Image: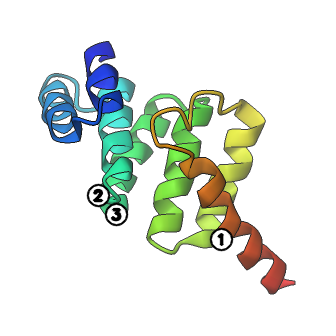
Amino acid sequence: MKKIAIVAFRGELEEAAVSCRRALDVDPKGFAPNFHLARVLVQQSSYREAVPFLRVAIEARPDSGPAHWQLSIALVGIGDYSAAWEHVERAQELGREDSGAADGGAPAAAEAPLRRRRFYRR
């Protein structure tokens, strides 16, 4: 899985996705292959496709702040702001220290529409 993160960091997302899908063949319920594939999909703006992989990752490791954070980004991408906000809050409770490293600042971008939506709901 470390190789996948390095490949994704270099911007070779298609290669990273192929490697993750191979890993899923071996361990379909495992945290790492689901989480890393979802991160690649989020980087490609394939938010709807990323959501089920992130849900499996969270099922495997409910205490993963980065997984909750990535799910919040994907949910914002598909317009499910209320669900996204729940995962933002959970990620902040758990810690999301590495959640933004590979996606060029997407976490801050993901929070902005959530804050606006929350403000307007009052």
Cα separation, mark 3 vs mark 2, equals 4 Å
Where is 101 relative to 76, above or below? Answer: above
Identify residue for label 1.
113
Q: Position of residue 30 (x, y in %)?
A: 33, 26
Q: Could you say which quadrant of the image residue 62 lies in?
A: top right
Q: Could you say which quadrant of the image residue 17 lies in?
A: top left
Q: Amino acid at mark 2?
A: Glu
Label 3 close to label 2 by CB (< 8 Å): yes
Cα separation, mark 2 vs mark 1, equals 21 Å
Cα separation, mark 1 vs mark 3, equals 17 Å
Q: Residue at x 42, y 36 (%)?
A: 57
**Quadrant where the image shows the N terminus:** top left
Element under disc 1: helix
Q: Position of residue 102 (x, y in %)?
A: 45, 35
Q: Which mark is residue 49?
A: 2
Q: Amino acid at mark 1?
A: Pro
Residue at the farthest top position: 2
Please rate how many residues cluster around mark 1, counting C-alpha atoms within 10 Å: few if below 14, some from 14 to 19, many from 20: some
Q: Nearer the viewer, mark 1 or mark 3?
A: 1
Q: How many marks?
A: 3
Left or right for 26, reference 51: left
Q: Position of residue 80 (x, y in %)?
A: 54, 72
Q: Earlier in the sequence, mark 1 or mark 3?
A: 3
Please rate how many residues cluster around mark 2, counting C-alpha atoms within 10 Å: few if below 14, some from 14 to 19, many from 20: some
Left or right for 102, reference 105: left
Q: Residue at x 61, y 58 (%)?
A: 109
Identify residue for label 3.
48
Q: Which mark is residue 75?
A: none
Element under disc 2: helix
Q: Nearer the viewer, mark 2 or mark 1?
A: 1
